Amino acid sequence: MRKVLFLLLLGALSAVSLMAAPKSVLEDSSLVRISTPEARTAFLDKAMKDRLGLSDKEYAKVAAINAKYEQQLQDITIANSTNPFDDQVKKKQKGNPFENLSAARDKEMKKALSCKRYKNYDKQRLEIRDALKEQMLFEKAERDRVAEELARRAALELAQAEALAQEQAQAHADSVAAAQREIKRKHAAMRGNSWVMSVKQAPAKKSPAKKK
């Protein structure tokens, strides 16, 4: 009973911690399951350049930051999902790893951007993240659709191949059966001919002479 109560309490605390976490943290961790670091980085680079009007110098810095932290996000999420209660993993992490990652990214963004652009970025970061998630979900749905179509085609081709193989096997069986019937017919004809020849070649029996 105590074990059940403990598990229920643990579940409740986990739910509360998720509700209290910043929106960007939840969005970040969920994105890993539907995308790759490269795809997220490419989208963020373009979105930030378009929305913030980055200079070439700022864009290069932002691209490097996005690539760095999207890969770290991938690594942290995989580590936590693989061993969520591993003590060794917990010892290496101080506080919430996703919050720490988000704070470190923001710190570097603040250095890379002008004060005005950073303020604009700070206002739009959740919108950018929402747009990223929407795009990644769309791309995942498209990948799933293509995969389903490929699977459907593969199944159809397999069914057609099996049907063709059955037709060929049946045609072969019919051909063999026809050949066997023809052989039997010829054998029967040969036996018949042999009997006729034997009858023809047999000496005729002399009828007994009549007594006078």
Image (cartoon, rainbow, N blue to C red):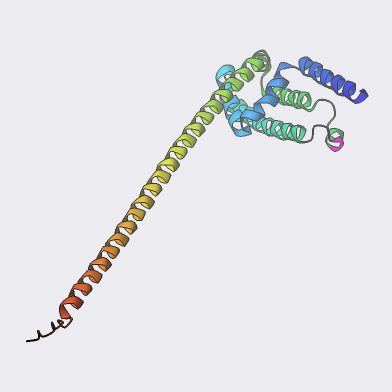
In the figure, residue 79 lies in which quadrant? Answer: top right
Quadrant into which the C terminus falls: bottom left
Residue 170 place in picture, x, y as percent: 36, 50
Query: Foreground residue, 202 or 205?
Result: 205
In the figure, residue 196 lies in which quadrant? Answer: bottom left
Residue 55 visible somewhere in the drawing: no
Query: Foreground residue, 141 or 119?
Result: 141
Main secondary structure of the magenta stretch? loop
Q: Residue 86 lies in magenta, yes or no?
A: yes
Q: Residue 75 lies in magenta, yes or no?
A: no
Residue at left offset 61%, top offset 22%? 133
User: Magenta segment, which residues?
Assistant: 83-88
Position of residue 159 in the picture relative to residue 22 (left or right): left
In the rendered image of this protein, does residue 163 appear above or below residue 79? below
Extreme right residue here? 2
Residue 106 place in picture, x, y as percent: 72, 22
